[in-house]
Amino acid sequence: MFGRKHKITSDISTLIGADTEITGDIQFSGGLRVDGRVCGSVVSTGGKPHSLLVLSEQGVIEGKIKVPYIIINGTVRGPVHSDESLELQPAAKITGDIFYKTIKMHQGAVVEGKMIRNDASQPEKLITYVAPKEEPKEPQDKQS
């Protein structure tokens, strides 16, 4: 309904500090805040349905992101997949395609890639029927 806002209930339980660089994929559940650099994929596991990733202004992720709730204010080089909510704050810089259900984009955020809305209510295949063209009818001669 109008005016109803869904609040993300995940607490940040893991922090990757500003002076930390991780090379490799990260799987997490709950909340993850990245202030440092991650060279690899960041994916939430099925442990908690409300997993949240927060990428701070100085944070960098070079790889795929697949998390239901995402807030980005840093740099991403790779595709971003959000099954629920994606927020791009003013310092966000994304080089890669974005797949989202709902998005909030602040002035100043930059996206170099496609933005593709995921809508589960749409059918996977859309079939269009095109009627065959009717051939023009020849005028009938009137015989008396």
Image: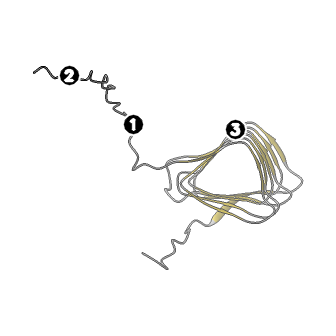
Using a 10 Å C-alpha cutoff, classify the residue at mark 1 as few (fewer than 14 neighbours), some (14 to 19) or many (20 or more): few
Pointers 3 and 1 in contact (C-beta within 8 Å): no
- Label at residue 25: 3
Using a 10 Å C-alpha cutoff, classify the residue at mark 3 as few (fewer than 14 neighbours), some (14 to 19) or many (20 or more): some
Q: Which residue is mark 1?
A: 126
SS class of the residue under badge 2? loop
- Between label 3 and label 1, give the one nearer the viewer: 1
Identify residue type, mark 2: Gln
Cα–Cα span, label 1 and label 2:
42 Å
Return the disc, 1 or 2, that comes first in the chain's sequence. Answer: 1
Q: Residue furthest right?
A: 19
Q: Is 13 in front, or is 49?
A: 49
Cα–Cα span, label 3 and label 1:
36 Å
- Between label 1 and label 2, give the one nearer the viewer: 2
Residue 83 picture location, percent across and down: 53, 51
Which of the 4 quarters of the picture holds residue 109? bottom right
- Label at residue 47: none
Q: Is residue 132 visible?
A: yes
Please tell me whether residue 117 is drawn above or below residue 104 in the rendered image: above
Q: Is residue 26 visible?
A: no
- Label at residue 140: 2
Cα–Cα span, label 3 and label 2:
76 Å
Residue 135 picture location, percent across and down: 31, 22
Identify residue type, mark 1: Leu
Return the disc, 3 or 2, that comes first in the chain's sequence. Answer: 3
Q: Is 101 in front, or is 59?
A: 101
Q: Residue furthest front?
A: 144
Please tell me whether residue 57 is drawn above or below residue 99 in the rendered image: below
